[in-house]
Structure formats: structure tokens, C-alpha cells
Image: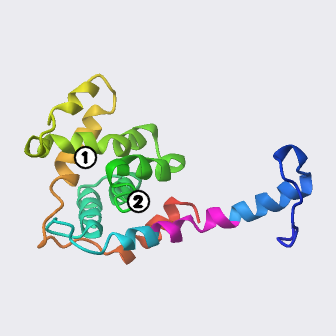
Amino acid sequence: MSSQHVPTFTKFSESTKQDWDNITELYKRTQGDVANQVLQQLQKLDGELDGYPVTRLEHSLQTATRAERDGKSMEYVMCALLHDIGDSLAPDNHEAVAAAIIKPFVSDAHHWMVAHHGIFKGYYFWQHIGLNQNARDAYTDNPHYELTAEFCAKYDQVSFDPTYESHTLSYYEPHLRAFFHC
């Protein structure tokens, strides 16, 4: 279908099959560009230190590298790499951004882990900023509690080491492309 088709509808109820054939074709291109968009967003995390010992990108690379070196699945490793991708877009709700990006590509368990890692990571420092470090305990009955607690303990909260030798973003690029099926 030609991308030259210009729809004339102003409401979906006025659209035609030709409109949707064209939109579907363009959607495939957009979906095929997701990995590029994600890579660009990750690169944006490579700016200032923002008070941390390493950049947000280096933190993400360390988290992913530690998980990979520990034998975690590539799906888990991609979650580790992308868990903070929303930091520059929505610092107060970055988990929701990351979880939304990965949702179509991961298991429910990994999606839940990314969506809730912020409150679980709080266990390690929230007492210093006047928040309840045990807030994660509200989820003890959730089947993904232990997975998320382990992710934060073993990979997320320990990945601020300026001397750690993590893999590069270019190392993870082919894995990201495969992850997003393009």
C-alpha cells in the first residue's frame, strides 16, 4: 500500500479500509524504529552525573551487565538495561515509563519487576529522605515480590560503581534490536 495516500477522515467512523491499510503499513515502520528510539533515549541518560557517582546510562549498563554475568535470561538483562529509561522523561514516575515500553515484549513477572522496582529500591535509601524504606512490604503477597527484591538487591542498588567494567551500549544494541523484534 502506498504511503502517499492522504486520508480525508476527521473521525474514525468516517475512515475507510484504504485509510487503515495505509495506517497499518506506516505502523509497521514505526514499530520497526522502536529500537532506534530506545537507543536514543538511553543515550540521553549519558549526560550529567545528577548527584550520582556514575551517569544514569552507566548505571543501566552496570545493572544489565551484572545480571548477564550472573546468568540471567536476555529478557531479564534487557529489563535491567531499560529499567530506568524513563528517568529523563518522568523522574517521579520513571518506572511506569519503562514498564510501558517493555510490556509487549516481556513476561508478566518481568513487567511487574520493572514497574515496581522504584518502591523496592527505596528499601536501601528512603530512610535518608524521610520516606518509609519498608513501603515495599505492602506487596509481600505478590508472586513477583521476591523477583523484584532480588533485582534491586543484586543488580539495581549496587550499580553505581565508577570502577565497574560494564558492557557498552553498542554491545547491547543487537540484543535490543532482537528484543524489540526488528
Q: Is residue 77 left or right of residue 69?
A: right
Residue 3, percent from left and from top: 82, 71
Q: Give the amino acid at mark 1.
A: Phe
Residue shown at 8%/45% (left/top)? 128
Residue shown at 24% from the left, 74% from the top: 48
Q: Nearer the viewer, residue 6 or 28?
A: 6
What residue is shown with label 1?
151
First in residue order: circle 1 vs circle 2: 2
Residue 101's disc is none
In the image, the segment drawn in magenta is: 29-38
Q: Is residue 66 left or right of residue 182?
A: left
Residue occupying image coordinates x 36% and y 46%: 114
Pick the residue in front: 49 or 74. Answer: 49
The numbered disc on residue 89 is: 2
Q: What is the quadrant of the N terminus in the image?
A: bottom right
Q: Main secondary structure of the magenta part?
A: helix
71 over 112 or under it: above or below: below
Query: Is 123 situated left or right of 179 in this image?
Result: left
